[in-house]
Amino acid sequence: MTNASTTSVDEQSGGLGRVAMRGSLLNSAQWLANKILTAGAMLVIAYFLTPAEYGVGVGSLAIYQLLCIFLPLTVGDVLIAHPKRFALLAPSAAGLAMIIGCSTAVVVLISIPIVIHIYTDYPTSWLIGLLVILAIRPIIEAKVVVPVAAMRLSLAYPKMAFVEGITQMGSTLLSVVMAALGGRGASVVVPPIFNVAARVVWYSHLANMHHSARFHPKLALFLFRLFVKAASAQYLHNVLTMLEILILGYVSGKYEAGLFGFAFLIAGQANTVIAYQLGVVLQPIFGRLQDDPERQVAGFLKAQRVLSAVCVPICFTQAVLAEPLFRLVLDAKWQPAIPIFQVVSLMQAFYFATGPSMSCLRAQRRFGTFFAWQGIQLLISLPIYWMGADWKGALGIALASGACWAISAPLVVWLCTLASPRKHLFDALAIFIRPWVVCVPLFGGFYMLTQWLSSFGRLGDIASLFVVGPIATLLAIWIMRFLHADIRNIIDGFVVGALKKIPRSPT
C-alpha cells in the first residue's frame, strides 16, 4: 500500500471514528443519566428485597434467556446487514419477527414443568408466574424490530437517545414502586416488559415507514436462513451472559444467585452505558463499509482503543471503591456481595470489548465466526463455572467468569481484524495490555489510600467515594492519552469542545 493510500485510509477511518463516537456520546448521555438512576434505584430495591428474592427474579430472567433459542430482535441485525434492500425486505422481516416471537412464547410456556422440576430451590408459584409473564415479551419485541432497524440505519441517534432515556427511566421507577409494594422478584422482571411495549408505540410513530412491498414467503425464507446463523450466535452469547446465574441457581440456590446477580448488575452499569451504545452505533456504520475492510477494521480498532481508555479505569475505580460504597448505602444482608462485586468489576475491564466486537462481526456478515467463538467459550465455561460455583458459590463463579472473559475478549477483537489484509494481532492485544499496565500500580496505590481512610469511619468512606474515586478515574484516563494518538485526539478534542462551551465574561 502506498503512503497516499495509507493516508486516505487513516483519514476515512478517522471520520468513521468521529461519527461513531458522536453517535455513541448522544446515546451514552441518556444512558449515563439512566444508569445513574438505575444504580440508585437498585440500591433502593436492595433495601426492600432480600438476596434470595432478588435471586428468584434474576433466575427467572436467566431461565427465560435459556429457553429463547430464537429472539425476534436479531431479525433487525439481519436487516441492517442489507441496507440497500431495506425497503424491499422490511415487510417480510416484520412478519418473520412476529412468527419467531409467537413461537418463542410457546416454547417458554411448554417448558415451565421441566423448569420447576430442575430448579427446586425456587418457589414454584413465583417461578411459574414470572415465566408466564416473560412469555409475552418476545411477541411485543417482534413489533419493534423493523422500526428500530430503520432508525438505526438512518443514524437518528438523538431521537433514539430521547426515546430510550424516557422509557428506561419509566421502567426503573416502576421497579422501585413494585419493590416497595411487595413485588419481590416481579419488580425485576415486569418493568422491562412495559419498557419494550412503550418503545414499540414510540418507534413505530417515529419511523413512519410506508413501503409498497408486502410480506413475501420467499423473502422471509431468505431472511430466515440468514437469521438462523445470526440468532444461533446471539443465543449462545445470551446464554453465556446468564450462565453464571443458571449454574448458581442449580448448584448453590437462589441466595448465591441473588448475590451474584446484584453485584453483576451494579458493576456492569458504566460499561453498559459506553460499550453497548457504541456497539449500537457502530453496526450500521460498519455495514456501510462492507466493501472496504481496511477502513472498517481501522475504525473498529480506533473505537476499541478509546473505549478501553475510559472503561478500564472506571472498572478499576469500581473495584477500589466497593467496600466504602457497600458500607455506606447497603444493609448488612448485602455485605457478602463486596468481593463478588470487586471481581466482576475487574472482569468488566475485559468484557467491555464484546459489544462493539459483536457488532463488527455482524456487519462483516461473519455469523459463523460469531457462532464458533461463543460456542467454544460456552463449552469451556460450563465445567469451569460449575467447579467455581461448587467451590465458592457466587465468588467462585465470578473468578471463573473473569478468567474466561480475560481470554475471550482479546480473542474476539483479533477475530474482527482478520477481515483486513493487514496483520493486527499486536493492535488487538495492546487494547487490553496498555490500560492494565497503567491501572494495576496506579489503583493499587489508591486502594491502600481508601483502606487508610476507612479508619476514619463514615467520613473516610465519603472521602473515598467523592474525592479519591473521581481523582483516580480522571488521572488514569489522562495518563491513557499518552498511550496512543487516537486516544489523545479524542480526549483532547472532548476537553477543547467542553471548554469552548463554558461562557466567558466580556472583557
Image (cartoon, rainbow, N blue to C red):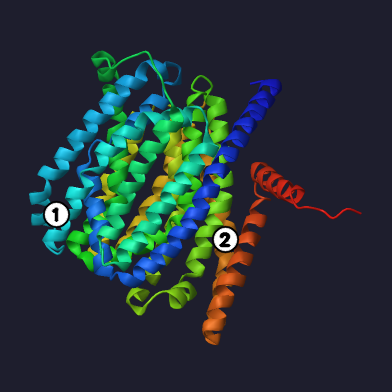
- The correct choice, above or below, for 406 with respect to 451 in the image is above
- The residue to which callout 2 is attached is 439
Q: Nearer the viewer, residue 198 or 435?
A: 198
Q: Residue at x 57, y 74 (%)?
A: 464
Picture quarter with the N terminus: top right
Q: Nearer the viewer, residue 501 or 351?
A: 501
Query: Residue 132: percent from the left, percent from the top?
Result: 17, 49
Residue shown at the point (39%, 70%) measured from the top left: 339
Q: Secondary structure at mark 2?
A: helix
Placement of 430 over or under 288, stated as above or below: below
499 vs 380, left or right, is: right
Closest to the observer, 507 or 454: 507
Mark-to-mark CA distance, 1 and 2: 45 Å
The residue sitting at 45% across, 21% down in the picture is 83
Q: Which mark is residue 164?
A: none
Coordinates of residue 493 in the picture (x, y in percent): 70, 44
For residue 229, side relative to residue 476 (left or right)? left
Which tag, 1 or 2, sits closer to the chain's start?
Answer: 1
Camera sees residue 148 = no
Q: Quadrant of the C terminus?
A: bottom right
Classify residue 208 as left or right of residue 14: left
Crowd rating for badge 1 (residues with CA inside 10 Å; few <14, some 14–19, many 20+): some
